[in-house]
Image: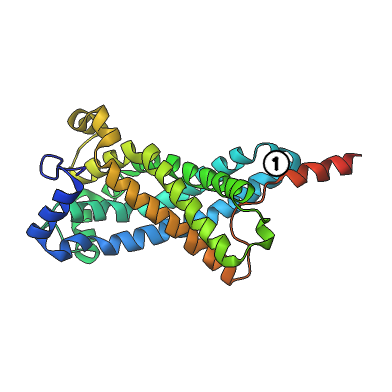
Amino acid sequence: MQIDPAKYKSISSGFGILLKEQGVKGFFRGWVPTLLGYSAQGACKFGFYEYFKKTYSDLAGPEYTAKYKTLIYLAGSASAEVIADVALCPFEAVKVRVQTQPGFARGMSDGFPKFVKSEGFGGLYKGLGPLWGRQIPYTMMKFASFETIVEMIYKYAIPNPKSECSKGLQLGVSFAGGYVAGVFCAIVSHPADNLVSFLNNAKGATVGDAVKKIGMVGLFTRGLPLRIVMIGTLTGAQWGLYDAFKVFVGLPTTGGVAPAPAIAAVTDAKA
């Protein structure tokens, strides 16, 4: 729908056309670069977020961390995503080319060398700028909104403190908070997602070419409903799995505890 809206006019017709032309395997085209790329990106994103969040919190100190906690979330997630996208970009380039140009390659094993032969190693990173433009706002929204939503769920929707909730309930809150955060992520990052798809699909294309071809309204709306469903589900699943792993190794789930007591601690210390 992003590359050829004249052909794929709606979600339902798009599924039908793809099934008719490419069969069931068409729905799984490009799954290997998707798996490898987003696994590398996810590991960097979540791992470095925890690192930068603690680093920036330590630099700010307890009082300012409590006062400006959302800025800490935004700065930590943005810093993590800069690194994560460097890992993702080559796989994203191959994935888009395999998915949008049937016959280009079967998958990662033949698509990667064919892409490099055609455009060089530098071509793998020609979409890095738009990818940062898509993923950094996406990730800032993903982490900051998730932390805020989860905190609000525990504060207003669940009568017991988080420490008294079962692990199953905490994981359910993580999934719900992640899904809602994913909807916001899809909306703020969608224009850049259209740019990334256009640039990786057309050899030698520029951002100006994309804007001229798609139009400003199209950048914000083309393919958005499907992406909201996909990103909402994906983000909810990511937070659920991430926090399930944290529970498995004996760590608390993410978010839900407001850092207000830190202010009281600092005040007591000053007194």
Task: Name the amino acid, label 1.
Answer: Ala
**Is residue 105 at least partly visible in the picture?**
yes
- Residue 115 drawn above or below residue 251: above
Tell whether 59 sits left or right of 210. right
In front of the other: 46 or 125: 46
- Residue 122: x percent and y percent? 29, 47
Q: In which quadrant is the N terminus drawn? A: top left
Q: Residue at x 61, y 66 (%)?
A: 166
* Quarter of the rendering containing residue 94: bottom left
Tell whether 217 sits left or right of 72. left
In front of the other: 90 or 193: 193
Q: Residue at x 65, y 51 (%)?
A: 54
Which residue in the protein does label 1 denote?
Answer: 66
Q: Residue at x 53, y 66 (%)?
A: 244
* Quarter of the rendering containing residue 148: top right
In front of the other: 210 or 238: 238
Query: In what element is the residue under mark 1?
Result: helix
* Quarter of the rendering containing residue 266: top right
The colour scheme of the drawn protein is rainbow
